[in-house]
Image (cartoon, rainbow, N blue to C red):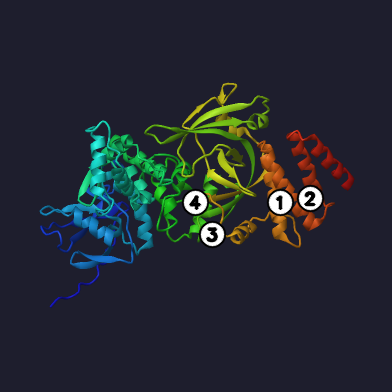
Amino acid sequence: MSYAMSLYSHSKLSGLHSIRLLRLMPHEAKAAPIQCQLFNYSLRGKYEQPDLDDHTGTHLYEALSYVWGDSDKLQSISIDNHDFPVTVNLYAALSHLRDCTIERIIWVDAVCINQADWEERGRQVQLMAEIYSKANRVVVWLGIAADDSDGALEEIRVAAGNESTNPSGEKKNQQAILALLQRPWFRRIWVLQEVAAARHILIMCGSKDIDGYAFCLGLRPLRLSYATCPGLQSLIRSVTYLIRGSIFRPKHARSSSDKVSLDIRPLCELIDMYHTHEATERCDKVYALLGMSSDNPSAAGLSPDYRIPWGRLFKHLIEYLLYGQVSAETWDDREMAVIKSKGCILGKVSLVKSHISWDDKQVVDITFKNTPRYLGDKMEWSACWTLQVSAKPIRQGDLVCLLRGASQPTIIRPSKDYLAIIMIAITPLEDTGTQRKGARGRALFPLVTNFPHDFLLVWKWEKSLGKFQDQEEYETLLKTVSQGPESLNPRLADQATRLWNMALILEDAEEYENAEKRLQEAIRGYERMFGKEHPHTVKSMNKLGLVYKGKQQWKEAEKLFKQVTETR
């Protein structure tokens, strides 16, 4: 007769830097039930010392980096003779990690954190950078063997070892490697911090494994064709950029009494690089990057707290990144914000080139037409900036702007009546050509004090900037930041005003054709709402005349100015 075991219940953790570790018991039979034990462990030693000098280096445990998988399909493991449900993917990982004779000590988030305790969960999330940085090894579990994953890993290993100066590149091998790279692990947001913290990485898929640095080294000469997988190349490069750095990381992470920071890049840049990665809970798209940031967002209240709704967290993040001088509307059920701010156009992207290096960079040529004017300089500037590759690719024709209160420029892309944010805050890794009286141009941006335009910005965290599928829904969202005058039809007036504001911005960017189209639509909207003699209509007609002058269409300009004079 068999008896069902009771469910495991976590005991309380003691100490700010206390975690639980999983002891995976050995078994000779691969199909045997998984037996484990959980025990408490302090990352800072017995006395929780804030000074880490006595507790440097790695500890004798491994940390697992994996994807949870379908939470509706569960299997049970035994912890201290109690049942504990885990996902099928985690069960498979533990099965492959289990040794036949020696117990293994592992940190696994789904088991070692009491996921039902929101308070503990928030505290443990703040320790994750320290947990992974102190692990003796981080094991990346890609999943069970499938789609010739064994052959794919072998091809990568051979390429890394230079055993073949000309990798085969056969279609079959290419397909197997691309299938491996499309596994969910590469798309998840949490894996970034996990590999960014690691000192040693082992990548496992089924029963095969490969060193993390060798994995990155082997991908370079394979010359994979990503034509059938849009966006995959930038996704993989953003992850391998972090994996390959593991062997160069010091044993000491920057630390304080309550936090270990990986000190990789400022939060604004991490957000620009990684916000299209996936998370089960939206708030993790922010929380998963905090431990990697070189600034201190927790001082501004951006610490993990799963009781805070996503919409409020997203708004708080925007205010932190843009220094609070914006009006932002966010929603709990979508990864999008509508932002209203005063701003100015600094210049335009004239060329974008890939930077072929390990460092995953892009080279952007920018023409600054307006920045000198705002600073009283009649000369035109240009610059060549090396930037970290962004989640949304920069394109020729994108605009560089400065929002009031911000210390760093923003790259935006004009749409019909709003501006899509491509990079919210840019910091060039290299800056050539932006010189004015011996000072770098980007050092002069904080001196800009003239912000003449009303910006309506949309920041979408999806992978594509495609059109909204539901135009009605889109209009509803933009209504929340109404910019138009009061009228019997506020929707029509709002759209006309948005078009007017966009036209002014495009004119400033010397995009006269596009400015003309927006003004013509705005004039039609104002005429329908208020008539030809209304000040909004007349003002738009006058501005259209100036745009015609900018395009050297003298007859059209003269005709329109005459209409404006007669109307007045």
Which quarter of the figure is the N terminus placed in?
bottom left
What secondary structure is found at the residue carrying circle 2? Answer: helix
Callout 1 touching callout 4 (CB < 8 Å): no
Relative height, residue 233 to residue 533 (above, below): above
Crowding around mark 3 (Cα neighbors within 10 Å: few <14, some 14 to 19, many 20+) is some
Label 3's element?
loop
- Residue 54 located left or right of residue 550: left
Residue beneath disc 2? 536
For residue 461, the mark is 4
The residue at the point 25 percent across, 44 percent down is 153
Residue at horizontal 82 percent and vertical 55 percent from the top: 531
Q: Is 217 drawn above or below residue 469 in the view shown? A: above
Q: CA distance from mark 1 to mark 4?
A: 26 Å
In the rendered structure, which disc, 2 or 4, sits on the residue that comes first in sequence?
A: 4
Asked if residue 123 lies left or right of residue 43, the reply is right
The Cα–Cα distance between marks 2 and 4, rounded to whole angstroms, is: 35 Å
Q: Disc 2, disc 3: CB below 8 Å?
A: no
- Please name which of the two marks, 2 or 3, marks the residue nearer to the observer: 2
Question: Is 46 placed above or below 383 here?
Answer: below
Residue toward you, 172 or 341:
172
Marks 3/1: CA distance? Answer: 24 Å
What percent of the width, then of the height, locates residue 482?
Answer: 67, 56
Tag 3: amino acid: Trp
Asked whether residue 251 appears in the rendered view, the answer is: no
**Mark 3 or 1 closer to N-term?**
3
Residue labelled with disc 3: 331
Q: How far apart, in angstroms, are the residues tagged by discs 2 and 3?
A: 32 Å
